Image: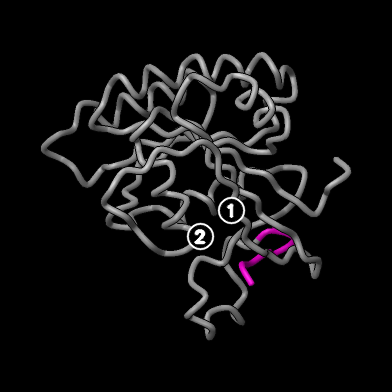
Amino acid sequence: MPEQSNDYRVVVFGAGGVGKSSLVLRFVKGTFRESYIPTIEDTYRQVISCNKNICTLQITDTTGSHQFPAMQRLSISKGHAFILVYSVTSRQSLEELRPIWDVIREMKGPDLAAIPVMLVGNKCDETENREVATTEGESEASRWGCNFMETSAKTNHNVKELFQELLNMEKNRNISLQLDSKKSSRQKLPGSNKIKEKCSVM
């Protein structure tokens, strides 16, 4: 186990303008902004409980620019899990993920098989502007050996589910998010797909 075993670090990569910050802000704060503000690097923290221990889900929202390769490599070296985001309205944004994936593969080496990675097609609400079919995203993910999901930060489609699924993929620690904190009555019921330890957003 790494020294900071209380932290679980998720790193979000993708080209500029694909909606990385929008996905993270929608998940952490429940907000969505229409305007585009380029990110250098932001980190958001969410407290989760895991087997009665307090853990911190640390989400690093990286720059979409290629100007900071050292920061990119540092984020990869520290990351426990990765979300690779493209926009379904931009084929170019999917192609721009390939070199990032190559660096992750190179740096993580044989450990990569045990690391949760999700390829994400964001902006799936923009059906008229779609350039990348769902099946194309799925086949790219299967080539890379990672999971796949389409999301919309704008309509909040699959946003919490994305982070939940990513944490479910973690094999070394049993961690998960509680999808709906409002439905407190459901929390007391044993979940049908519950794993050994249940973690929830506090």
Residue at image x 63%, y 27%?
Answer: 71
Q: Are marks 1 and 2 in contact (CB under 8 Å)?
A: yes
Left or right of 164 in this view: 176: right
Secondary structure, magenta segment, majority class: loop
Residue assigned mark 2: 28
On screen, 185 above or below 159? below
Across the whole image, how many numbered discs are drawn on residues? 2
Q: Quadrant of the C terminus?
A: bottom right
Residue 42 found in image quarter: top right
**Is 159 within the magenta?**
no
Colouring rule applied to residues:
one colour
Left or right of 47 in this view: 42: left
Toward the viewer: 190 or 157? 157
Residue at image x 58%, y 78%?
Answer: 187
Q: Quadrant of the N terminus?
A: top right
Residue at image x 56%, y 22%?
Answer: 68
Residue assigned mark 1: 44
State which tag comes first along the sequence, 1 or 2: 2
Residues packed near mark 2 inside 10 Å, few (<14), some (14 to 19) or many (20 plus):
some
Where are the magenta residues, as a range? Answer: 195-202
Left or right of 133 in this view: 168: right
